[in-house]
Image: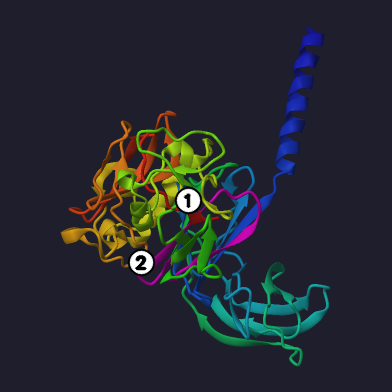
Amino acid sequence: MYLKTMKKFFFIFIGLLLINSVIGQRTAIELTFTAVNNTTYVHMDSIKIMNRTQGGETILVFPDTVLSVLWVGIPEFKDLSGLKVYQNYPNPAGEQTTINLYIPEQGQVNLMVTDVLGRTILSRVMDLSSGLHTLLFTPGKEAGYFLTVIWKGYSQSIKILHYSLNLHQQGSLEYIGHTPTPVELKALNDSRDFIIYPRDEMLYIGYADTLQSGILDVPEVSQTYTFQFATNIPCLGTPTVEYDGEIYNTIQIFSQCWLKENLNAGTRISGTEEQQNNGIIEKYCYDNVESNCDAYGGLYQWNEMMQFSTQQGTQGICPPGWHLPTDEEWKMLEGAVDSQYGIGNQLWDNSGYSRGFDAGLNLKSTWYWGSGNGTDLFGFTGLPGGGRDSYGNFGTIGSIGAWWSSTVNFGIIASYRSLHSAYSGVGRSDYTIQYGVSVRCVRD
């Protein structure tokens, strides 16, 4: 009996050690958000963070632009009544950058700016009342700084990056103003139920006035995400792409960069043949006419498009540095271009022939659709290239355009998007993978 008791105690003791070891090894990652329009800093109102794998969401309200997550998946909460130093904006800083700090009670505040070697660049002592305070920092010749704020024995620091070096300036820290109303650091009720596990796909949505921009990612380490609010311009740094003898234009649609034209890569084969895993990219041209490929791009079976992989988001037949859009990336595009149903709206999770209000109208080109032409408001230039069915027949050119996603269901059908001359919405459904439809690529 004694031995059994001791053995049981031993295993309990070992279990507690393991638990403490796991807890002791927990690390926090920080997800930091900023935004630009082309290359100009954008002031965001808020950031919504949605877990697309597990469900749940939380919201950061400006000036809070950092989400700290303990890497067991639980958001790291601090006392919301305590000292808070918000990340500067813009970051990296140019000639000047703005910093907000919050203190809950009046008191003496020590401000110290150091360089990356720990040398003090400047310091200030101020007596501040409770509330939100705004500072303007003018960097000098260093590429990076740390700002440390000390109040009643508590301290917090932020790192400030600097890309516009001024070799003749030591830097300055100027007090701008005060907002007495306490600020909401997080939507706490939502955050309590918000969990991130390793390999969860996250959707981040940045809001600025009436605009929104989205980013999809699977976070693994601390990093900074930059929302892009420019649209209907060539992609920054990549206005064109040359691939397989063709030159493609690119189009920036908020934080996504797409090829502006349907892919037209590969060697044409007859519509009566199946595309094979033979190391050669094969394409169909509508009615077996090469000029239709020149006008509308090629048509591809799903396996050929994927180059016989099943990994969603793979490069497939896209140019290097580009990949085949996932079902979630199509949803983000739809929400970005619709005037009534935004990014992350549950409507985009549904299947149907005409989802949304005017996303399809805004994605369709202004030609080839007859009476159903679109506005092409965002420069996507969706064409009615028709398709090839699983029996080798071509149809619907001029009235329907369809594009694969790289998301497969049950191994024999895959998700696709469609635009129709008679509808203003976007269709989402599944085709058997033997169908041949158009392909678009999105930049990594």
Residue 313 lies, in percent from the top left, at: 51, 45
Q: On the rendered structure, is 313 left or right of 198?
A: left
Task: Locate residue 134, reporting x and y percent.
Answer: 56, 80
Q: CA distance from mark 1 to mark 2?
A: 24 Å
User: Which corner quadrant of the image does residue 252 belong to?
Assistant: bottom left
Residue 265 is tagged as 1
Disc 1 residue type (three-letter): Ala
Quadrant of the rendering where the C terminus is positioned: bottom right
Measured as percent of width and height from the top left, residue 170 is found at: 75, 89
Q: Secondary structure at mark 1?
A: loop
Residue 26 lies in the magenta stretch? no
Q: Nearer the viewer, residue 76 or 231?
A: 231
Q: Report the residue at 38% width, 68% height from top.
A: 211
Q: Residue 346, can we see it? A: no
Q: Visible in this render: residue 218?
A: yes
Reply above or below: 283 against 128.
Answer: above
Q: Quadrant of the N terminus?
A: top right
Decide which of tag 1 and tag 2 comes sooner along the chain: 1
Q: Residues within 10 Å of mark 2 (few under 14, many from 20)?
A: some
Q: Tell me if 378 is positioned left or right of 238 in this view.
A: left
Q: Is residue 209 left or right of residue 94?
A: left
Is residue 44 positioned above or below 297 on the image? below
How many discs mark residues in the rendered view? 2
Main SS type for the magenta part? strand
Which sits in the foreground, 222 or 246?
246
Q: Which mark is residue 369?
A: none
Q: Which residues are magenta?
A: 207-231
**Numbered label attached to residue 378:** 2
Give the vertical position of 185 relative to 17 (above or below): below
